[in-house]
Image (cartoon, rainbow, N blue to C red):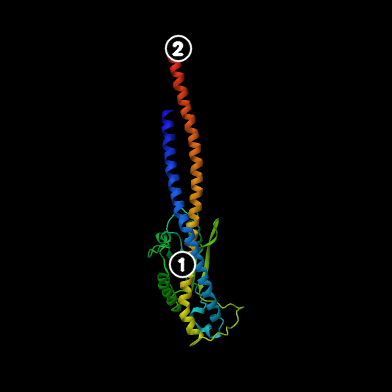
Amino acid sequence: MGADIKSLRTRIKSVSSTQQLTRAMGLVASSKIRKATERMLHGRDYAAALEQVLSALTASPTCARSPYMQVRESGKTRLIVIAGDRGLAGGYNANIFRTVKDYPDAEIIPIGKRACDRFGGEVRSCEKFDSRAAYDLAVTLCNDFAAGEYDRLGILYTQYVSMMSQQPEIVWVLPLTRDEGAKTSATLFEPDEETILRTAVPEYVTGRIVAAVRESFASEVVARRMAMDSAGKNAAEMIADLQLQYNRARQGSITQEITEIVAGANA
């Protein structure tokens, strides 16, 4: 009985330490949520503005000659995979890695420490990945696409739906496609639409990458906050159950001691 009491006391202490850890991690995640969601919304707006510019340019017949609009059949794919910098965020990272399996032949470009750990390559942190790094990556990707080194570029990231829901999503960035419903813009481009398109595409790819990284990071901190809240509730329930077992074991031990004392006195 004494061993059971000691074991229960040790387990209660261990679960209490875990509860304190999850509470601290939840508070850290909460402190990042507002800033992360603001940056995510700014990234969405910037990407949407670039989409409008590209839509106007690709509607021009002269841009059809651009290498960025050439659809090739060999199917070599590069996929930017954005995962988290840390774990303990529920199914956040697992959902991304599960989706990657649908593209077994893709060349992976990881962003996020967990993605870099899994796929190798240069370590890129989501939290510290800025527009300069995105632009450098975009220029390399655009040059390689124009040179025919691969045939399509996609970004796998986590779409922020709500505090309760985040889901993996793929956006295909290259080659550019013409919106069949778009009308030729009345805007006059100098020197010409194709030249402007060639200049705009790296900026467009940069905007897409930045927006996806920011949305993924916002999804990560929200997922971690929800996971830590859930873990904290589970720890509280476990502590209550263990405390009940401890009280019963302690009560049983005291009853046994009293019984032995009474039995000894009557002997």
Mark 2 residue type: Asn
Q: Residues within 10 Å of mark 2 (few under 14, many from 20)?
A: few
Expressed as whole percent of the image width and height from the top left, the position of residue 50 reads 51, 75
Q: Which residue is mark 2?
A: 266
Image point 43% across, 73% down: which residue?
138
Q: Which residue is mark 1?
A: 80
- Say the numbered circle drawn on residue 23: none
In this view, 69 is above or below 38: below
Give the mark toward the camera: 1 or 2. 2
Image point 50% across, 34% down: which residue?
244
**Image quarter hosting the C terminus:** top left
Q: Secondary structure at mark 2?
A: helix
The picture quadrant where one finds residue 139 is: bottom left
In this view, 195 is above or below 243: below
Q: Are marks 1 and 2 in contact (CB under 8 Å)?
A: no
**Image quarter hosting the N terminus:** top left
**Nearest the camera: 188 or 60?**
188
**Nearest the camera: 150 or 182?**
182
First along the sequence among labels 1 and 2: 1
